[in-house]
Image (cartoon, rainbow, N blue to C red):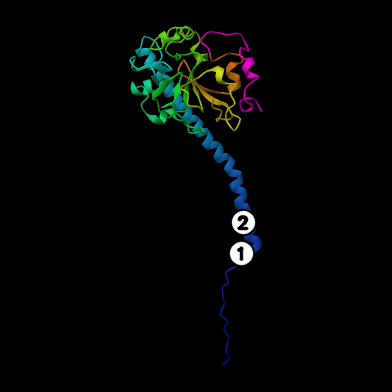
Amino acid sequence: MQTRSHHSSRSYARAFTLIEMLLVVSIIVLLISLLLPSLQKSRETAREVLCRANMNQVTRAAMAYASDNAGGFPANRHQPNLAIANQHVTWRWLLRKGGYATDGGLWLCPNAPEVLTEMNRSIHGSTCVGDFFSNYAYNGAGFWRFSPMGAPDSSHLNRYGMPNGKSQLTLRNIVSPESTMLLLESRGYWPDIGDWALPWDTWPDGGGPVGHWHRVGSNWGMADGSVRWSLVYDTGNPDCWWHITPEPSNAHLNWQSMLPAVYKLP
């Protein structure tokens, strides 16, 4: 009888070699490096859109306030108690306290490097007693302003709810609301920032007081309720968005030449 020998077969799991493992890791790293910029760009876009939505609501809140107050916008800084001359609240506080923009999240830009407040800070001898954290400021060159009691030009007489002589802007007399800036992004604690502040360069990173964290530009709330993106440099050229009346072309070449480098085109 012939005996047939049977050989049992064994299965061997093939292990990765070191070179193959390194190749796989390299491919994964390459894919991540290719995807990261796209993901980062998507996050930046989402933040810019959220900021624009916030600014749209705050801008419309200011317009609603004006509609309820004979066309007058809230004062940059307002003295709530006439018996206490050295205390004031901000326009942000007026809108929030009045129920026009009560959600604290509306006042914050998700891309802003700083979130500041004027609360407990002093200006012209008056201390702020009503403000909160925010990245949004008024257009201080075109809207209401604050004057200390006893100002030599008597401008303090217009600080309690009447516009001063340089900024009599109401819903009814805005010449070009679509090109008149009402709201801007700010990295400072001031509730109002005007074109006079643009040449400032007091931050360690070389940036100025106006936001520039959306594609090196900023969102701007206009007096018609719209919000648009623009470079800081272009807000004064060829059309000036900072004032309430039409101005000549290239109205701000003087301060444009003094802007911090971060505001200029690459």
Q: How many marks?
A: 2
* Residue that appears at 38% across and 23% down: 93
In the structure shown, which secondary structural element does the residue marked by tag 1 occupy? loop
Provide residue 71's location: percent of width, then percent of height: 39, 10
In the structure shown, which secondary structural element does the residue marked by tag 2 occupy? helix
Q: Quadrant of residue 236?
A: top right
Horizontal side of 22 relative to 188 (left or right) equals right
Asked if the stretch drawn in magenta spans residue 234, the answer is no
* Residue that appears at 51% across and 26% down: 186
Q: Quadrant of residue 9?
A: bottom right
Per the rendered image, the range of residues in magenta is: 243-266
Q: For the residue marked with disc 2, what is the amino acid?
A: Val
> 10 Å neighbourhood of mark 2: few (<14), some, or many (≥20)?
few
Magenta part mainly helix, strand or loop? loop
* Residue that appears at 47% across and 14% down: 143
Q: Which residue corresponds to mark 2? A: 24
> 10 Å neighbourhood of mark 1: few (<14), some, or many (≥20)?
few
Provide residue 65's location: percent of width, then percent of height: 37, 16
